[in-house]
Image (tube, rainbow, N blue to C red):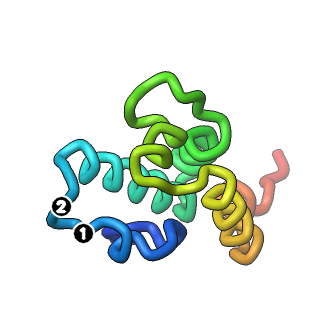
Amino acid sequence: MGRSSIPPFPPALEARRSLQKMSGIEHLMIAVVSTAFDDLRGHDTRQRDTAVKYFFNDPETHVLSFPSVCRQMDWSVSAVRRRLMQTLSARPRPVAATEIQPRRRV
């Protein structure tokens, strides 16, 4: 799965802040959120679990925490989380390979 450049959930990012006018840290913030969003939709269970923790349980303890990024980018944390939940509930959950393999009898 290819990486998306900007997650679709922040509404009208381009209208609020030109990508050319963003600082280096803001570009990094977008990259972190974008990667977490891709991981959230991916098939790797560990990456998906880490992304869920990032979006829904990450305290504002560092500059790249989800709440910190939202504050810097002028996004509503609750609105973005609501959209993420809608996106996740609309998609079928990826099935891990261990879930689809029949058990062998010994």
- Is 3 displayed left or right of 101 in the figure? left
- Horizontal arrangement in the rendering, residue 104 relative to residue 68 (left or right): right
**Which residue is located at x 74 percent, y 58 percent?**
99
Task: Give the residue pinned by disc 2.
Answer: 21
Which residue has dot 1 on it? Answer: 18
Q: Residue at x 84, y 51 (%)?
A: 105
The reply to whether the C-beta atoms of the residues labelled 2 and 1 are less than 8 Å apart is: yes
Q: What amino acid is at disc 2? A: Lys
Place of residue 54 in the rendered image (x, y in percent of width and height, measured from the top left): 56, 40
Q: Where is residue 10 shown, x and y percent of the image? A: 50, 66
Does dot 1 land on a helix, a strand or a loop? loop
Apparent side of residue 60 relative to residue 18 in the rendered image (left or right): right
- Which is nearer the eye, 44 or 90? 90
As displayed, is residue 5 above or below residue 32?
Answer: below
Residue 84 in view of the camera: yes
In this view, which residue lies farthest toward the top? 61
